[in-house]
């Protein structure tokens, strides 16, 4: 998120937390992470970074757009095979999905409209423009990434909430802390799901026990033709 050096309210702090952990929840599904923070600094409100970088998601400079501009001259032209750059297409999709996940997480888990994440959008446009042939197709590509990010966040909402609770307290988490939090959330969900399954089965057994044998036989027997 963008620069935020001013004191912020508890609601704004919660918004930053959910924005960053939404990046994390989606980004971790495609690659390891170095860490994340909800503490503000020059040029950012919070950060997510990779294992070999201290500022994977520092959106205050031109690094990503400039890199995409340099790579674009190597991309195939109209009619040329794209087989040799398939990994670039996959990387662009994964990064765009991760970039827009912060805003989609705000939209899913918090009241009100999301803050406009200028640098997230700027980088997403750079990645989309790298693999798309027009502004219209780039916009459609980013919209598709928004849908994908939203679906991933819905499916992993229990992970998002667990990460948010931990980041709210810890303020900064390294890659090991992120992985540990995710692993605990997965185990807890599996345990809760199993308890719910057993509770549902007990309810079925209790309901079945209320029927007398005659009632069960009557309910399961076909009506006689002359009745």
Image: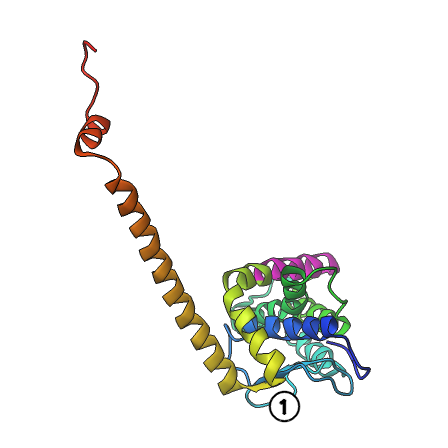
The answer to whether residue 59 is above or below residue 147 is: below
Residue drawn where x is 54% and y is 60% of the image: 154
Closer to us: 6 or 213:
213
Q: Main secondary structure of the magenta part?
A: helix
145 in the magenta segment = yes
The answer to whether residue 151 is above or below residue 215 is: below
Where is residue 222 shown, x and y percent of the image? 20, 22
Q: Badge 1: how crowded within 10 Å, few (<14), some, or many (20+)?
A: some
Figure colour scheme? rainbow
Q: Quadrant of the N terminus?
A: bottom right
Where is residue 223 shown, x and y percent of the image? 21, 18
Q: Which residues are magenta?
A: 134-148
The answer to whether residue 103 is above or below residue 165 is: above
Give the residue at mark 1.
54
Numbered disc total: 1
Secondary structure of the residue carrying tag 1 is: loop
112 in the magenta segment = no
């Amino acid at each position: 998120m963008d620069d935020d050096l001013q004191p912020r309210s508890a609601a704004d702090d919660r918004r930053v937390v959910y924005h960053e952990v939404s990046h994390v929840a989606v980004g971790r599904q495609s690659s390891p992470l170095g860490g994340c923070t909800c503490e503000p600094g020059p040029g950012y409100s919070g950060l997510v970074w990779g294992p070999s970088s201290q500022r994977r998601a520092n959106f205050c400079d031109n690094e990503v757009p400039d890199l995409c501009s340099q790579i674009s001259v190597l991309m195939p032209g109209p009619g040329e095979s794209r087989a040799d750059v398939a990994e670039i297409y996959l990387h662009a999709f994964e990064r765009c999905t991760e970039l827009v996940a912060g805003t989609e997480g705000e939209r899913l888990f918090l009241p009100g409209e999301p803050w406009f994440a200028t640098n997230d959008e700027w980088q997403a446009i750079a990645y989309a423009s790298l693999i798309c042939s027009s502004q219209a197709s780039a916009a459609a590509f980013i919209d598709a990434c928004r849908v994908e990010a939203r679906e991933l966040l819905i499916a992993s909402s229990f992970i998002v909430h667990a990460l948010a609770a931990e980041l709210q307290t810890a303020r900064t988490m390294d890659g090991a802390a992120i992985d540990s939090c995710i692993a605990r959330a997965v185990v807890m969900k599996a345990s809760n799901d199993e308890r719910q399954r057993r509770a549902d089965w007990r309810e079925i057994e209790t309901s079945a026990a209320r029927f007398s044998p005659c009632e069960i036989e009557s309910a399961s027997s076909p009506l006689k033709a002359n009745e």
